[in-house]
Amino acid sequence: MASTREIKKRIKAAGNIGKITKAMEMVSAAKMRKAQEKALRSRNYAKALSIILSQISTAVNIDDVALPILRQQKKIGKDLVIVVSTNRGLCGALNSNLFRYLESFLDERGLKKEQLEFIGIGKLAGHYLVNRGYKLVASFTDFHDIPLADEALAVSRLMIDGFTKGEYDTVSLVYSQFINTLTQKPIGVDFLPLSTKELESWGKEIIATEDLESFLKGFILFEPDPTTILEEIIPYALEVKLYQNLLEAAASEHSARMVAMRNAYDNSKEVRHELKLEYNKVRQAKVTNEIADIVTATLSVTQS
Amino acid sequence: MSKQLIHLQVVTPEETLLETKVIEVSVPTVDGEITLLPGHINLITELAEGELRYRVPGSQEDEYLLIFGGVLSFHREQLMIVAKSAVRAQDIDVARAEAAKKEAEEMLSKKLENVQFAQVKASLRRVMMELELAKKYRKIKH
C-alpha cells in the first residue's frame, strides 16, 4: 500500500489539475459567446448584401450574366477543399470527428486523392492532411481564437482567384457546425461554382419578405451598371459566408473545449474524492497498527 | 426645408459601424465623390477608397469616416453602405497607425516577393489614409 505522503501528493496534483481545467472551461465559455456574438453582428452585413443582390436581380437576369465566378470553366479534374480545424487540441473528439467526416465527404462526392488540393485552417488540419499524403496548398495556422474578417478575406481571395483562373472545378468547405453547446456536427458546404439559385435565395431567411418587397419597388439607377456591381459584390458575399462559417467553427471549438474541460474538472473531483478515501484508509490502518503494537507491548510487559 | 432625413447605415463584415439619421452624406465612388441629399433618386453604385462625410441634423460640423471600398445602395431615404472595411475618424489610433506605417516602410525597404509586396503596400496606403484623416479631424475638432 502506498504511503500517506505519496497519496497526499497525488491529491494535490488532482486538485491543481481541477483548478486549471476549471479556469480553461470558463475561458472557453467566454470565447464561445464572443464568437457567437460576432457571427450575429456580421449578419447585418449579410442582410445588406442580399438586399443589394435582390435589387440587382430586378434589373438583370443573373442567369444571363457571364461572370467567370458563376460558371464552371472547362473541366480540368481538380478540386479544392478547405478544411477548418482547430489550432490546439483539448477539445474532445471535435477534430477526429471532423477528419472522419472529411473522408466520407470525399468518398460521397467521388473525389479522388490525386485530383484534390487542400487549404488547411488550424494546425491540426495541416498535420492531418500532410500525414495522410494529401496535397496541401496553403495552411493557415495563425488565425485568432475568434477569427477576424481580414483572415477570412485572405482565404476567400485565394479560393476565388484559384477558381476564376480555372485551376479548380469546384471549391467546398468542411467545418464543424455549431448546433448547441453540447453538439457540434461536421458538415461540408459548396462554395464555388456559385449557383445563381443560391445567390438569389441567399440571405432570404434573414430578411422579412415585406422588407425586401419595399426595397424592390421603384426605379433604381445603377452606376456604372448592374453587371459591374454584381461582379464587385459576389466576392463580398462569398467572403461573409466564409467568415460566418469560420466563426461558427470557432464557436464549435470553444464549446467542445468547454465541455471537455468540464468533464476533466468533474473527473479531477472524483479522483480527489477516491484518493482522499484511500488516504484516510491508510491513515486509519496505520493508527490501528500502532495501537495494536502498544497494546501487545503493554500486555507483554504487565503479564510477565 | 424638408423634414426628410436619410437613414444612414454603414456595415462591415465585423459589425454595424454606424446607424444614424443624417441630412447630408458625401461618399467616394469609383467615378468620383457624390453627395446625397434627401429625395435623391434610388441608386446603387460601387465605392472607392476614401473618406465619407455626413452631417447629423442640428450639427454645424461634418463627421468623418474612412471606407475602403464597397457598395452603396440608396433606396427611399435608406442608405446602406456595405464596406469591406471602415473606420471612424475618432476611432483611429494614431500611435498604432504610426507604428504600422513604420513597420510597413521597413518591410518595403527589404526585398519581398510580389504577393507580399502588394500586401504590404496596400496596408501602407491604408495607414497613410488613416493618419491623414486623423490629422484633419483633429484640426477640425480642436
Image (spheres, helix red, strand yellow):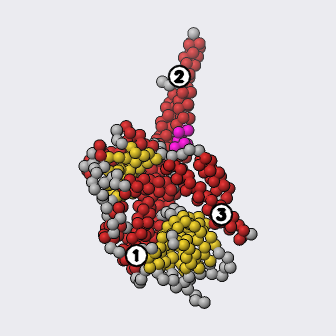
Q: Is residue A69 visible?
A: yes
Chain of the residue displaying label 2: A
Q: Secondary structure at mark 2?
A: helix
Q: Secondary structure at mark 1?
A: helix
- Image point 55% across, 86% down: which residue? B4
| Majority secondary structure of magenta residues | helix
Q: Is residue B98 left or right of residue B113?
A: right
- Image point 49% across, 32% down: which residue? A278
Mark 3: few/some/many CA within 10 Å (<14, 14-19, 20+): few
Furthest residue to the bottom? B1
Residue A192 bears which disc, if any? none
Mark 1: few/some/many CA within 10 Å (<14, 14-19, 20+): many
Q: Amino acid at mark 3?
A: Glu
- Image point 49% across, 50% down: which residue? B115
Q: CA distance from mark 3 to mark 1?
A: 35 Å
Spot occupied by residue A172 in the image (x, y as percentages of width and height): 35, 54
Q: Which residue is mark 2?
A: A289
Q: Earlier in the sequence, mark 2 or mark 1?
A: 1
Q: Which residues are magenta?
A: A15-21
Queried whether the magenta region covers residue A155, the answer comes back as no
Q: Amino acid at mark 2?
A: Asn
Queried whether the magenta region covers residue A18, the answer comes back as yes
Looking at the image, is A280 positioned above or below residue A103? above
Q: Which residue is mark 1?
A: A55
Q: Which residue is mark 3?
A: B132
- The front one of A3 and B110 is B110
Chain of the residue displaying label 3: B
- Image point 65% across, 61% down: which residue? B131
Furthest residue to the right? B142
Spot occupied by residue B123 in the image (x, y as percentages of width and height): 57, 55
